Amino acid sequence: MDDLTIARAIHVLAVVHWIGGVFMVTAVILPAVRRFAEPSRRMELFEAVEGRFSAQAKISVALAGLSGFWMTWRLDAWHRFAEAGFWWMHAMFAVWLVFAVVLFVAEPLFLHDWFRRRARTAPEATMALVQRFHWTLLTVSLIATAAAVLGAHGTI
């Protein structure tokens, strides 16, 4: 087993955990919180549950980024970013970049505080916004993941 095989396995496992977790938060946790919690407590409950996944997601996003960089460097595949036919690599990188910025920059610096303040004055609208944001990220992530698998196997 060589380093590329190990990097690919780490990459796939990290993406499965990360995007699978986003799917769970989006399709199960957010609807349950909206259905079962009173509006004034929804954001608090959501953050308590999602906060446990956030720490794990940071590890998965970091591993996906490091293993993706390693594979690109090892294969000397940088040229793919200059070729339109490898648009799926751009999509993977863009999705990774959005999540990395949200998890490592926006959430700790301002996003949590902004949502808490907004939830105090408009709890329903805030939870609707959070859910729309999660559905958008999930949809884009699933498209990029499917395209990456197809592209890596020469299908697209």
Image: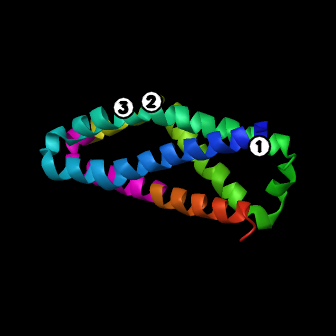
Instruction: Decide: few, some or many residues near mark 2? Use Cα within 10 Å; few <14, some 14-19, many ≥20.
Output: few
Q: Helix, strand or loop at disc 3?
A: helix
Q: Which residue is mark 1?
A: 71
Q: Give the residues drawn in magenta, as a range.
A: 119-137
Cα separation, mark 2 vs mark 3, equals 6 Å
Which numbered disc flags the more N-terminal residue, 3 or 1? 3
Percent coordinates x, y for residue 144 in the rendering: 60, 59
Cα separation, mark 2 vs mark 1, equals 25 Å
- Amino acid at the residue labelled 3: Arg
Q: Which residue is mark 3?
A: 52
Q: Quadrant of the C terminus?
A: bottom right
Please tell me which residue is depicted at 47% across the width and 28% down the height of the picture.
109
Is residue 141 part of the magenta span, yes or no? no
- Amino acid at the residue labelled 1: Met
The kind of secondary structure the magenta stretch mainly shows is helix
Q: Which residue is mark 2?
A: 55
Dots 2 and 3: beta carbons under 8 Å?
Answer: yes
Please tell me which residue is depicted at 53% across the width and 31% down the height of the picture.
59
For the question of whether residue 154 can be seen, the reply is yes
Cα separation, mark 3 vs mark 1, equals 29 Å
Q: Helix, strand or loop at disc 2?
A: helix
